């Protein structure tokens, strides 16, 4: 249970960091946005081992798809119970360009 809670919490933190970065920095493209950028720019800290960030750049409507995946070992059922938006150790969400 503790491991699943930790993974879910880190995924929430990464999601929040991505959303903050995008809304504050208003980047023209998301192709360079990765976990290292979020850490280096001060949006994220902590142990990010076994986490991956994949972003599909803005589409023609200003929508981007973000996927955060945990590649380590964790009880997937517990993880999905803790954070219902997670499926197969991946959290997928969208960000809309507002500017």
Image (cartoon, rainbow, N blue to C red):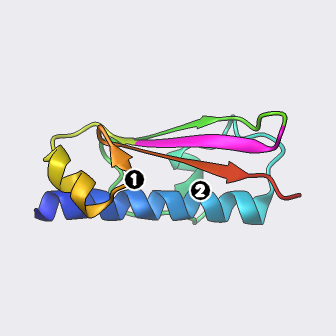
Q: What number is the disc on residue 99?
A: none
Q: Could you tell whether 43 is left or right of 5 in the image? A: right
Determine the residue located farthest toward the right in the rendered image.
Answer: 99
- Residue 46 in the image: x percent, y percent? 37, 63
The residue depicted at 81 percent of the width and 44 percent of the height is: 62
Q: Judging from the image, what secondary structure is the residue with disc 1 in?
A: loop
Would residue 35 be found to the left or right of residue 26 on screen?
left
Residue pictured at 61% horizontal, 40% vertical? 65
Q: Main secondary structure of the magenta part?
A: strand
**Disc number for residue 85:** 1
Separation of marks 1 and 2 at Cα, in angstroms: 16 Å
Give the residue number, with chain letter if any, for mark 2.
18
Which residue range is magenta in the image? 61-68
Q: In percent of the image, x 58 and y 66: which residue is there?
A: 42
Against 31, residue 86 (above or below) is below
Percent position of residue 76, x then y: 19, 45
Percent from the top left, x then y, of residue 59? Answer: 77, 34
> Residue 65 versus residue 34: which sits nearer the camera?
65
Pointer 1 or 2: first along the chain: 2
* Residues at marks 1 and 2 touching, judged by CB atoms closer than 8 Å: no
For the point 16% across and 55% down, the residue is: 78
Residue 22: x %, y % from top left: 71, 57
Q: Quadrant of the C terminus?
A: bottom right
Q: Eyeballing the image, is 78 above or below 71?
A: below
């Amino acid at each position: 249970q503790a491991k699943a809670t930790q993974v879910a919490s880190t995924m929430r933190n990464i999601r929040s960091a991505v959303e903050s970065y995008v809304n504050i920095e208003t980047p023209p493209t998301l192709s360079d946005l990765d976990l290292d950028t979020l850490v280096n720019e001060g949006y994220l800290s902590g142990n990010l081992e076994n986490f991956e960030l994949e972003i599909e750049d803005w589409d023609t409507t200003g929508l981007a798809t973000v996927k955060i995946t945990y590649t380590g070992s964790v009880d997937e059922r517990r993880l999905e119970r803790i954070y219902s938006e997670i499926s197969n150790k991946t959290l997928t969400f969208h960000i809309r360009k507002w500017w």
